[in-house]
Image: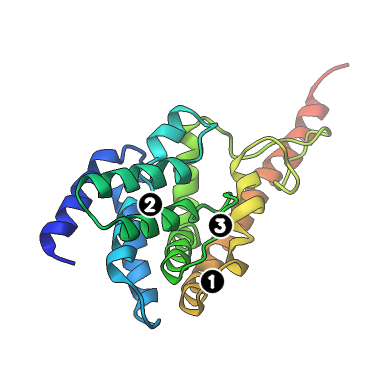
Amino acid sequence: MKKSTYKLIENYMNDCMTDSAHDKEHVYRVLYNALSIADTEDAVDYDVLITACLLHDIGREEQFENPKLNHAEVGAEKAYQFLREHHFPQEMAAQVRECIRSHRFRGEARPQSLEAKILFDADKIDVSGAVGIARTLIYKGQVAEPLYSLRQDGSVSDGTNDEKPSFFQEYKYKLEKIYSQFYTRKGAQMARERQQAAAAFYDSIFHEVSAAYTDGIDILRRQMEE
């Protein structure tokens, strides 16, 4: 890929990124992770891969404004239109569109091409480990969702089977399970190296908040008069 082509795509990406949890630095980390994975694979189309990585989250603003939208679907179409408007080959633009469409963990579309699988894995690596925890907490704060929910008895739920969104719910639904859902060997290896850090943080914060409720509620009850 020519430097001028890279800068054209990069500039468009920068114009689209407004979410601090899915900012341009997230995009660069995904790109660099993808290149590390691609370096262990054969017959990778680097033009498709680099372009898809740079543009994979350009639909985030639309989803943030309207949660009913799927940023992968929105971004896929935006990327396709941008590439065609700048005279990229139709086949290449279509391949990029499919990579972006299938990169979402919650999406129904599954990655089919090697480039799509690499993008999926590289994006999920940035949800793993300590970075994944930090990004999730930032996002939960942006959308005003709590750290955890309480059970009917007043105890802290660990997030398992919670219907209400929270950090604990997201950890149990996605962050804890993500390590078994990689398509490439290198991607899975990179994620596993981060797994312990995420698990340790979740275990620590769960035990800290649970202890506060358990001990504090008992003391409060003893101090209250009937």
Q: Name the residue under label 3.
A: 201
Q: Residue at x 56, y 57 (%)?
A: 201
Asked whether disc 2 touches disc 3, contact meaning CB atoms under 8 Å apart, the reply is no
The quadrant of the picture occupied by the N terminus is bottom left
Q: Which of marks 1 and 3 is in front?
A: 1
**Residue 21 visible in the displayed image:** no
Quote the CA–CA distance across marks 2 and 3: 28 Å
SS at badge 1: loop
Q: Mark 1 points at which residue?
A: 183
Give the side of residue 225 with respect to residue 195, left or right.
Answer: right
Q: Residue at x 56, y 33 (%)?
A: 145
Amino acid type for the residue under numbered disc 3 = Phe
SS at badge 2: loop
In the image, which disc is placed on residue 56? Answer: 2
Query: Which badge, 1 or 3, is on the more N-terminal residue?
Result: 1
User: Label 3: how many residues lie within 10 Å, few (<14), some (14-19) or many (20+)?
Assistant: few
User: Label 1: how many residues lie within 10 Å, few (<14), some (14-19) or many (20+)?
Assistant: some
Query: Which badge, 2 or 3, is on the more N-terminal residue?
Result: 2
Up the image or down, 26 lies above or below 220; here it is below
Amino acid type for the residue under numbered disc 1 = Tyr
Quote the CA–CA distance across marks 2 and 1: 18 Å
